[in-house]
Amino acid sequence: MTSRIESTLATLKAKGRKALIPYITGGDPHPSHTVGLMHALVEGGADIIELGVPFSDPMADGPVIQLACERALIHHTSLWMCCDLVAEFRKTDSTTPVVLMGYLNPIETRGLEAVCVRAKASGVDGLLIVDLAVEEAPDFAPKVRAHGLDLIFLLAPTSSDARIEAIAREASGYLYYVSLKGVTGSAMLDIDSVRAKLDQIRRHTVLPLAVGFGIRDAESAAKVGAISDGVIVGSALVSQIEKHQHEPAVLPALLKQQLAEMRAALDALA
């Protein structure tokens, strides 16, 4: 059965369009605002939403998302609460794929089977587990897919051909290429290096390739969109949330506008 992620990306490809995949942290600045922000992202042109599960030690994330996790954890935002937020989102949006992005510890604490059951029942479409090593994937991935969930993996500038091939065997939905050597929110996007690495990755997989880290605005989104299947934007959006955390009523319109500018730049590539 075709997943919602696979179907969405196939439709975009058929239309010659690029996927726009925003990330926000669940529960930031407060759980009561998350669903509204998710809908605002869709209105701004999101094709897939990555919803971050707050974690106390987000090792791959820079200060912006680390602070978002702290703000969310103050309000006791948990993995289960994130599932509940997706279920609430699904009451009025049955089409936009949602990926839960986070770390392995909360999943191991609750048990993979229980997490997959709860996530699927809530309307989650995929899991992206930052610190899941591909060596663990042969036991992990089949259980995730058995519940109709995609398992999305990260690839890095340092990933070897052998590692790319191993990850491509286990992944589904799309592959997330981390364009920079560093944490989320890093600067200095080198388009030529990204293009060369994407060419290398494509020799091992037919999965869509989405690029994240370093996408800050419409200009950078267009540059990356021109050479990839989609762009992922996180820290630029989460920075807005941090800036306006004490006036959350303005956030839906701000995020919608910010994303709409990127959407227009990507659509101009078609």
Image (cartoon, rainbow, N blue to C red):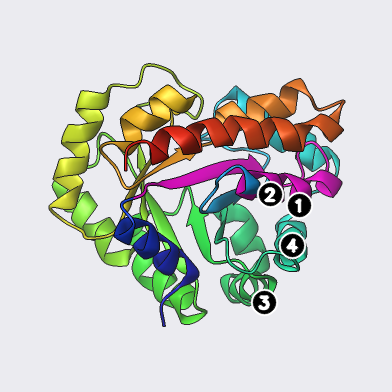
Real-space CA distance between mark 3 and mark 1, rounded to the nearest whole angstrom: 17 Å
Q: Quadrant of the C terminus?
A: top left
Query: Which of the pair 180/267 is nearer the observer?
Result: 267
Three-letter code for the amino acid on which mark 3 is drawn: Ala
Disc 2 or disc 4, which is closer to the eye? 2
Residue 248, how many percent across, how many down?
Answer: 84, 32
* Quadrant, the N terminus: bottom left
Per the image, the residue denoted by label 1 is 35
Q: Nearer the viewer, mark 3 or mark 1?
A: 1
Q: Identify the residue under disc 3.
A: 121
Assess whether residue 40 is covered by the magenta stretch. yes
Secondary-structure class at tag 1 = helix
Ranked by sequence position, the earlier of labels 3 and 1 is 1
Residues marked 1 and 2 touching at CB (< 8 Å):
yes
**Left or right position of 246 against 65:** right
Q: Quadrant of residue 8?
A: bottom left
Residue 212 visible from this viewpoint: no
- CB atoms of marks 1 and 4 within 8 Å: no
